[in-house]
């Protein structure tokens, strides 16, 4: 287990941890977790993300909207994480915001 230095994730996480090696990792979530494949347009709410594959590139994406209802598909979140990576990468999200 290794702490990954950086600015953390907006919304609460002060740092992230990288886990590698043999064995089992148990992740506890509120609700049944959802595993999503990483594509060039995979976005997730930073409060719902629980884990992601180490080869994924994480980009903090902030959206500034003058009107919240301007885009019918807009989630209302101002900060999201965008994930990029080769096929086979994934993210794990919980269906509940902390």
Image: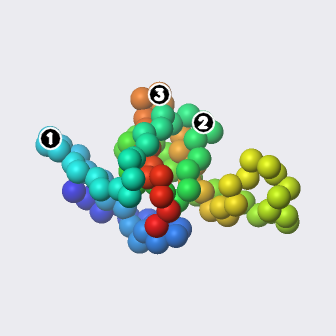
Give the residue number, with chain letter if any, for mark 1: 22
As drawn, 75 above or below 37: below
**Residue 43: x and y, percent?**
59, 47
| Residue 40, numbered label | 2
89 on left or right of 40: left
Q: Earlier in the sequence, mark 1 or mark 2?
A: 1
* Whether residue 7 is visible: no
**Residue 13: x and y, percent?**
43, 68
Please give the name of the residue rendered at 52% of the width and 59% of the height, measured from the top-left corner: 46
Please give the name of the residue rendered at 53% of the width and 45% of the height, measured from the top-left corner: 83
Q: Residues within 10 Å of mark 3 (few under 14, many from 20)?
A: few
**Residue 95: x and y, percent?**
48, 52
**Residue 93: x and y, percent?**
45, 49
Q: Are marks 1 and 3 in contact (CB under 8 Å)?
A: no
Foreground residue, 78 or 60?
A: 78
Residue 79 found in image quarter: bottom right
As drawn, 68 above or below 25: below
Give the residue number, with chain letter if any, for mark 3: 87
Instruction: Tell how many labels.
Output: 3
Q: Secondary structure at mark 3?
A: loop
Q: Secondary structure at mark 2?
A: loop
Q: Are marks 3 and 2 in contact (CB under 8 Å)?
A: no
Q: CA distance from mark 1 to mark 2?
A: 29 Å
Please give the name of the residue rendered at 46% of the width and 67% of the height, measured from the top-left corner: 98
Q: Secondary structure at mark 1?
A: loop
Q: Earlier in the sequence, mark 1 or mark 3?
A: 1
Q: CA distance from mark 3 to mark 2?
A: 10 Å
Residue 14 found in image quarter: bottom left
């Amino acid at each position: 287990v290794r702490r990954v230095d950086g600015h953390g994730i907006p919304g609460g996480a002060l740092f992230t941890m990288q886990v590698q090696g043999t064995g089992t990792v148990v992740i506890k979530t509120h609700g049944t977790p959802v595993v999503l494949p990483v594509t060039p347009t995979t976005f997730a709410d930073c409060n719902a993300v629980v884990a992601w594959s180490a080869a994924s590139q994480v980009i903090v994406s902030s959206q500034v909207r003058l009107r919240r209802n301007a885009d019918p598909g807009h989630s209302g979140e101002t900060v999201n994480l965008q994930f990029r990576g080769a096929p086979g990468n994934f993210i794990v999200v919980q269906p509940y915001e902390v």
